[in-house]
Amino acid sequence: MSVAAALPNLLAGRYQLERILGSGGMGVVYRARDLLHEAFGEPSAGIALKVLGETLSASSDAHVLLYSEFALTRSVRHDHVVRAFAFEVDTVHQLAFFTMELMQGMTLDRVLKGCLQGLPWHELQPLALQLLDALACSHRQGILHGDVKPANIMLGEQGLRLFDFGLGYAESQEAAGLPGLSRGRLNAWTPAYAAPELMAGGALSTRTDLYGAACVLYDLAQGQRPGGRQLDQQLPRPRRLPRHCWPALRSALAADPEQRNVSIAELREALAGPRRRWFL
């Protein structure tokens, strides 16, 4: 029986599950109502609630792994990162979960299906800057997202939200002796967005997050995925990307991490700045 089928309708006597919002290799996210907040007259009692998926729920350290994701998400306080609220355990059903803000909008993988020619630059540029700002904030706090891809980015009226730090990593985890998620336990990376060194069994780094973000931006500017190409294949400049932005993005897309000679901040600067003129 799957976790989704086994879940009760009410968790911790407070959270009323309504429907599944999404699922992946690690977990299942539900739309739920916070009945306590609703009882006190909160105008919006809707939340998102995440539990581990069937693959990991039977692990002896399943609760710790879920808490690790919650802690990473909560640590990154940024307007363009989803807000985590609380980690709880339903003692009756022995089920751990955490709650977070209910995001309105659609994920970028759905957006991409509707723009086969890519997004116009005036729409793409603010999204690119928001994504890179969110990652820069995360990296300053020693946190790697680990799985930057369109399905983990929500677009709504307030802009972009990065979510799902389930494959992420923080130096503080190792220092505290907390268990991490290894490829031996779950191979959950998406080949079209995972850096080649990750697919070869390498470690997460700021450069792997940079590569994933660059693939997302290439998609948005070109309307097709760069993933699956031969490593020596030359990518064309995306049709929607200004010419002066291409060198920085192309560097971030290098298959060899040593050739990614640009940082998140430098890529942001290249995409944010106006084209430089050679004359005054």
Image: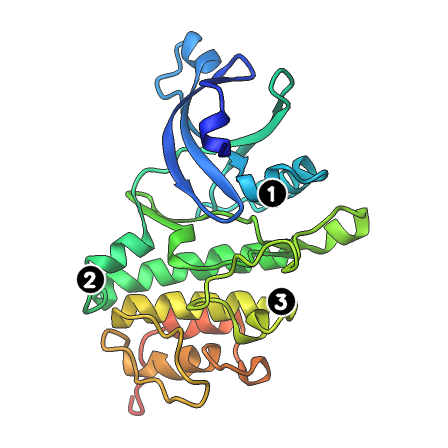
**What percent of the width, then of the height, locates residue 76?**
57, 47
Q: Nearer the viewer, residue 253 or 66?
A: 66
Label 3 with label 2: CB-CB less than 8 Å: no
Vertical position of residue 250 compared to residue 154: above or below: below
Q: Secondary structure at mark 2?
A: loop
Q: Quadrant of residue 114?
A: bottom left
Residue under label 3, please give it.
205
Residue under label 1, please give it.
56
**What percent of the width, then of the height, locates residue 237?**
30, 83
Task: Say whether residue 49 is visible.
Answer: no
Q: Secondary structure at mark 3?
A: loop
Sequence-first disc among 3 and 1: 1
- Specify the amino acid type for callout 1: Leu
Sequence-first disc among 1 and 2: 1
Seen at 63% across and 70% down, the residue is 201
Residue at mark 3 to residue at mark 1: CA–CA distance: 24 Å
Vertical position of residue 225 compared to residue 136: above or below: below
**What percent of the width, then of the height, locates residue 43?**
35, 17
Circle 3 or circle 1, nearest the eye: 1
* Number of other residues with Cα within 10 Å of mark 1, as a class: few under 14, some 14 to 19, many 20 or more: some
Vertical position of residue 112 compared to residue 215: above or below: above
Sequence-first disc among 3 and 2: 2
- Specify the amino acid type for callout 2: Cys
The quadrant of the rendering that contains the C terminus is bottom left
